[in-house]
Each structure stands twice: as C-alpha cells, then as structure tokens.
C-alpha cells in the first residue's frame, strides 16, 4: 500500500472541502507554516510500507524558518526549540549519541513517521488551525497504520498524544508513553524514559532493523 491509496480512501470517506477552502484563504492572506509544499513532507520521506515508528506531535512550530512538515523537526536555519533539545538530551543519556542538527529528516528516512495531529498553523498563533479538519485526517492516518501494518512502535508524549492510543491496536503494536519533552514537563518523567532504546528493542525482537537515531553526523565523529 502507498500513501496515495491511503489518502484516496480517507478523502472518499470524509469531506475536506471546508478545510481546503479555509487553507486556501489562509495561505493567500496570512503567513502560514509550513510552506505549502512541505505540508505532507512526513509522508514524502517515510513511505507507508516503511513505517516502523510513529512519533506524534501536536501542531507545527509557529515561528519563522522552523516548521517543514515533520513533527519536532526544524529547518537548519530555524530557532532550535527547547523540546527538541530535551529530546536530544534524552537520546544522549539513553543510547549515548550526540546530535546537533535541528532537522530530523534522517529519522524520517529510517522509517520514523513524524506526524503532527494538525499539519498547519498561522504565524505566531499556536493551535490556530486546530479543529479545521486536520485531526480527522490524522486520526485516520493513525488508524490505517495500526490496521494495515504490523509491529509498529507508537511514541506518545504528553496527554494530547496519549489520547490517540484508542486508535491503535495494542495487541500487535508497541506503545511508548511519557510526559512531553517540553521544558514544562520534561523533568516529570520524560528524562530517563529511554524511548529510543525501547523502540529499537521492540523492533529487533520482531526481526526488524533498528532505527539509527544517531544519524550521519554521529557516525562521522
């Protein structure tokens, strides 16, 4: 199965015309992130049949030169967000590798679907596109991955992500949960949660190649 088939099935069952009309007006009259061509980058970089891990975010970063279609990932010239810094701190503590690049495209190419539940946002206005229809679309994405794939690791950080667990068949997938890596909550259970080694242990136990969380920069050091 390919994402194009998944998208076709979802759009056959739901009417997204109002959302598309809203987005057309927003992109024409406001500054909206990410750029239109990057809205679906998570799907472009992680083919459906290659998904091994799903990391759920909420909505894109709303600052300039940050969002580019991958949850938690930032464009190279964008401001480095604190949640990503905390993710990297836990990565180093968990499996010992240091990352400094701000983007997570290598994770996406490894099979990590970096999925925000809302895929667009108005500049400077967090959650400004919540409730326009994206949640219907991304819930269907989560359900389809759960239904059609086997032995996927779903990483759910924070309460909004954990509410999506009901969409996942936990009898055939692994769910890793903790508080969100944001500075507001990271010290209440994110640090020390070891999501990266847990995910790889599950993948290896089910005869899959583990994720290279360290990336090329760590391998070159």
Image (tube, rainbow, N blue to C red):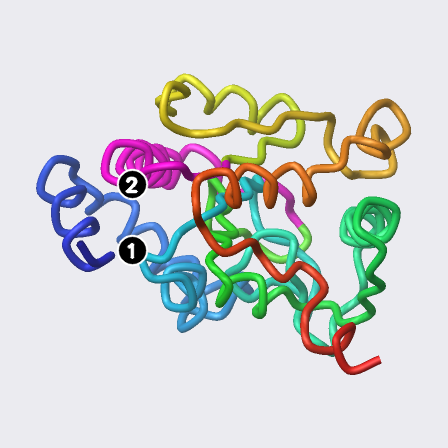
Q: Contact (CB < 8 A) between labels 1 and 2?
A: yes
Dot 1 or dot 2, earlier in sequence: 1
Where does the image place residue 191, in percent across and percent down from the top left?
Answer: 85, 34
Where does the image place residue 173, in percent across and percent down from the top left?
Answer: 42, 29
Q: Is residue 134 magenta?
A: yes
Q: How many marks?
A: 2
| Residue 187, above or below 48 | above
Instruction: Out of 104 and 40, give the one closest to the viewer.
Output: 104
| Residue 205, above or below 164 | below
User: Residue at image x 19%, y 59%?
Assistant: 4
Where does the image place residue 131, in percent across and percent down from the top left?
Answer: 42, 32
The quadrant of the rendering that contains the C terminus is bottom right
Question: What residue would you read off at disc 2?
Answer: 149
**Residue 201 falls in which quadrant of the image?**
top right
Where does the image place residue 198, in percent across and percent down from the top left?
Answer: 65, 37
Instruction: Out of 210 and 54, give the one closest to the viewer.
Output: 210
Q: Residue furthest left?
A: 12
The quadrant of the rendering that contains the N terminus is bottom left
**Residue 57 falls in which quadrant of the image?**
top right
Question: What residue would you read off at disc 1?
Answer: 49
Q: Which mark is residue 177?
A: none
Mark 1 closeness class: few <14, some 14–19, many ≥20 residues within 10 Å: few
Question: Left of 125 or right of it: where is 77?
Answer: right
Give the secondary structure at mark 2.
loop
| Residue 182, above or below 119 | above
Q: Is residue 123 magenta?
A: no
Residue range (magenta): 125-153
Question: Left of 24 or right of it: where is 81?
Answer: right
User: Residue at image x 55%, y 65%?
Assistant: 31
Instruction: Out of 110 and 183, give the one closest to the viewer.
Output: 110
Distance between the Cα atoms at labels 1 and 2? Answer: 8 Å
């Amino acid at each position: 199965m390919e994402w194009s088939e998944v998208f076709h099935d979802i759009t056959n069952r739901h009417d997204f015309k109002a959302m598309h009309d809203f987005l057309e007006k927003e992109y024409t009259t406001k500054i909206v992130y990410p750029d239109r061509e990057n809205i679906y980058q998570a799907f472009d970089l992680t083919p459906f049949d290659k998904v091994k891990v799903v990391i759920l975010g909420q909505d894109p970063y709303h600052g300039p030169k940050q969002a580019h279609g991958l949850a938690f990932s930032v464009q190279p010239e964008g401001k480095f967000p604190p949640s990503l810094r905390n993710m990297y701190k836990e990565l180093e503590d968990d499996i010992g590798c240091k990352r400094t690049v701000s983007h997570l495209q290598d994770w996406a190419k490894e099979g990590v679907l970096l999925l925000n539940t809302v895929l667009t946002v108005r500049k400077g206005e967090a959650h400004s596109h919540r409730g326009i229809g994206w949640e219907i679309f991304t819930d269907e994405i989560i359900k389809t991955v759960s239904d059609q794939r086997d032995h996927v690791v779903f990483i759910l950080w924070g309460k909004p992500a954990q509410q999506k667990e009901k969409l996942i068949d936990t009898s055939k997938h692994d769910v890793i949960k903790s508080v969100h890596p944001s500075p507001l909550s990271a010290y209440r259970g994110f640090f020390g949660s070891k999501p990266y080694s847990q995910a790889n242990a599950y993948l290896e136990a089910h005869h899959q190649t583990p994720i290279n969380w360290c990336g090329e920069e760590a391998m070159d050091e």
